[in-house]
Image (cartoon, rainbow, N blue to C red):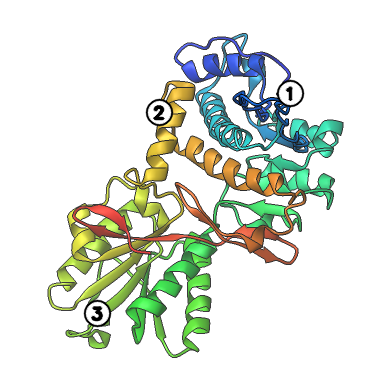
Amino acid sequence: MISVQNHLLPLSGNKWLLFFSVALILGACSPKVQPVSTPVKKVEKPQPKPAEKPPVKPAAKVAVISMILPMGLDHVRPRNYSNAGLSQANMSVEYYQGFKLALDSLAAQGANFKLQLYDSKDDNSTTLGLAYHTEVRASDLIVGPVYPDGLKQFAVVMGTRMAVLSPLSPASPATIKSNNLITAIPPLEYHAVGAAQYINDKVKPKKIFILRSGFSQENDYVFNFKKATDSLSNKKVKIISVIITRGKLSGLLPQLSKTERNVFVIPATDQAFLGVTLRSLDTLNKNYPVVLFGHPSWEKFGFLKADILQRLKTHITSSDKVNYKQEATIAFLRSYRKAYHVEPTEYAIKGFDEGLFFGRQLSEGNRNMTEIDKTDFTGIHNGFHFVKKPGLGWVNTHVNILMYSNFELKQVE
């Protein structure tokens, strides 16, 4: 059953919360499908034998999942949600709906779940209190808290009792430091590793130029990219890292090739820097063939020019790419619209993928999640390839490689 402090009331401009209040009342236990005996046709015989009843299968053991999300239910009655609070509440509802839809689909196949929902209120003291909650501590899987600060405190209290899933944050597990943590969204370092792997396997350059803006937030990406490249190439690929000012690339000309592809990596996200530097690369590309690899955030940057990115053969890594033409996506969209009468958001899609993967793990008896690194999974928004890291738990390392083609991003790996 759904465990919350308050029932939701209608909120102006937020049909999600109105719908969700009904969902809370109806409950969150996935329906258990029972086998139905098929009637046996009567056969005309002198002494007909009674129809044998099919053996009754024992009910599947109930897997208990506790979900901790920043609903902010205490703001519902006075209708005083802030913009940030309303955004968090919508995110929570959307993620919950996707996750529960996945559990419902598994329940229709014979699995049995009890989904308990708790409101963290985006408050660390409330989150910490939930770590001591009897029903939470008795769960087979805990989903949340969502934000790293609350998750860190929560994980310390939980210790090694059970697996705790970080469902939406790409924060490095090194900031949490829990051996039972499951990080579902690949942290930035694995985007850097994914780019290095693709460049090493597919492009095979002799040199790689890293163009930096000079901001310190690029250091994590650069460090992990260089480390992965050195490991994959046995340090045979020369990495040239330079800080670029006002798009001036003339100092690199003596090291560039006019016949072979020149590989550039730009880990920057600053709009002004990208605008100038990409235009300079576009000019350079007329005489020196360019292949560009960018930061995963570029996928959501509306200020980037698609024609320039396409001419530069730009690749980016992604953990959020949805192919709306594939059969699995179409089936999900149909089921979600039927259940909730709205279009799913990215949070609903992530909730569905995670609900399907971890729900299957529970239904197959993997209650402590110790074997999730033995099963890969292809979801709608991304795949799961978990690796166990000592002291950091299980981390999803799978990222997609996308390339700009025909003025849109298409998956190449």
Question: Identity of the amino acid at label 1?
Answer: Ser
Q: Looking at the image, which is closer to me, 65 or 104? A: 104
Query: Label 3 vs label 1: CA separation?
Result: 57 Å
- Residue of label 1: 3
Residue that extends furthest to the front in the rendered view of this protein: 46
Query: Label 1 vs label 2: CA separation?
Result: 26 Å
Q: Give residue 363's position: percent from left, percent from top.
A: 69, 44
Image position of 227 (left or right of 250): right
Question: Identity of the amino acid at label 3?
Answer: Arg
Q: How many marks?
A: 3
Question: Identity of the amino acid at label 2?
Answer: Glu
Q: Quadrant of the C terminus?
A: bottom left
Q: Which numbered disc, 3 or 2, marks the residue that appears first in the sequence?
A: 3
Q: Indicate the secondary structure of the residue bearing disc 1.
A: loop
- Residue of label 2: 343
Q: Give residue 119's position: percent from left, percent from top.
A: 69, 27
On screen, residue 80 above or below 188: above
Q: CB of mark 1 within 8 Å of CB of mark 2?
A: no
- Residue of label 3: 261
Q: Which mark is residue 250?
A: none
Q: Give residue 27's position: percent from left, percent from top.
A: 67, 20
Please name the residue shown 59% across and 25% down the image.
41
